[in-house]
Amino acid sequence: MQTVHTKVFQKEYGAGEIVKTIGQNYYVSFSGKMRVFEEDAFNKGYLSLYEEDAALLENDREIVINAAENKGYFSIFEALNETVGTSYTGWMKATWPSNDALPFRLWFPKLAETKNGVLIPAANECLNILSSDWNEISYEDLKDNLKVSTAYTGITLVFAKEPNGGPYIFRGAYRDDRDQMTEKRYVSRRIATRVKLIGKPSKKLELLDEFKQESNKPDLANENDLIFQNGIMDRDKFQTALISALGSNSSYKVVVANKKNTPILDSAGKTIVSIYYRTDGIRVDVSLRSKYYDAVQALESANLAYQKDSADPYATPGRYSAFISSENSVKAIVKLVEYDS
């Protein structure tokens, strides 16, 4: 029978030490967790002496995680213990490890919730949004603490927490997309759905189905084809397309107000453009003293809009009104709000 303080190895728990023996049982500590084994555990192969070969076996531990499995974890430490092979009883941070020592990291974002058509941050004024196909995840800092210069250069394994108390689910491996970032918004694109983690704890990984994503900027012409059927506007589809089209520029906010109009706000929360719906297009109102007055005129010169005459019953006093036809509506509005970007 082995003695107290003997170092042992177990395939599931890793390296440990016999801390006491009672009767025919070994009491073994694995990173502070106690496990009990019977005396014949060595003969049956459940335990082995911790030797150099065992240490190498621990370093060669491999586990494959697959986004298609939709496996959920209700705590971060549970996900870490199962995937990278740690033995935590808790982990409070949203990323692992706590530094950039590895070529990859695990990120556990809490996804934003939608209430009455408005996105609500889940925690710490961080707006985390995962696309419906899981191919893009964005992080918007509502506290102005974001520094794009420090964007992560390695691979991020995303375990996104579903809204309304849902679990953390592995969605894939991602890389930051610097071309789509702004001063307040990170954007990352998925590059793999199956990953092999190596070591205990894992220090290496392999991407098993790496692929390259192209930029997913919306095709505005196709968006308009969906919005207008037989010349009649679907207002809900228009709002969805507009939010999507402006998604890469978080300085602007599209407010889903009602069925009559949609304001677009700047970073200071001021309305820069008001959009009013017509069956065959939209009417855009801007202040005569606003710089967007020039922008609307530029749209007119590009045949994207035209000014209604003063007798227009829809015109707003003291504001410049322009009508934009159905086939150019989203494209024109995007150009308008990006006028000063």
Image (cartoon, grey):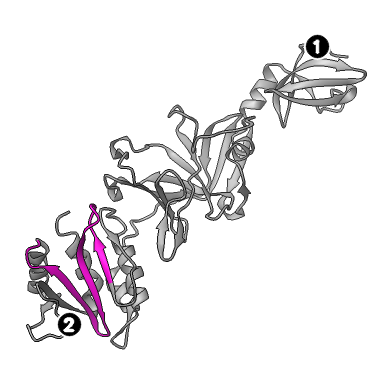
Query: On the rendered structure, is 151 left or right of 42?
Result: left
Residue at 7% over, 67% down: 288
Residue 15 picture quarter: top right
Report the quarter where the N terminus lies: top right
Query: On the rendered structure, is 320 left or right of 201?
Result: left
Figure check: 184 above or below 311: above
Q: Magenta residues: mostly which secondary structure? A: strand
Q: Residue furthest front?
A: 317
Residue at 12% over, 85% down: 312
Report the quarter where the C terminus lies: bottom left
Q: Depth check: 268 or 19 in front? A: 268
Task: Give the magenta part as a residue range.
Answer: 262-290
Q: Residue furthest right?
A: 23
The alpha-carbon separation of the residues under discs 2 and 1 comes to: 88 Å
Label 2: which secondary element:
loop
Number of the front mark, 2 or 1: 2
Residue 255 placement (x, y as % from top left): 31, 64
User: Is residue 218 at least partly visible in the picture?
Assistant: no
Q: Which residue is mark 2?
A: 314
User: Is residue 203 at least partly visible in the picture?
Assistant: yes
Mark identifier at residue 4: 1
User: Which of pointers 2 and 1 lies earlier in the amino acid sequence?
Assistant: 1
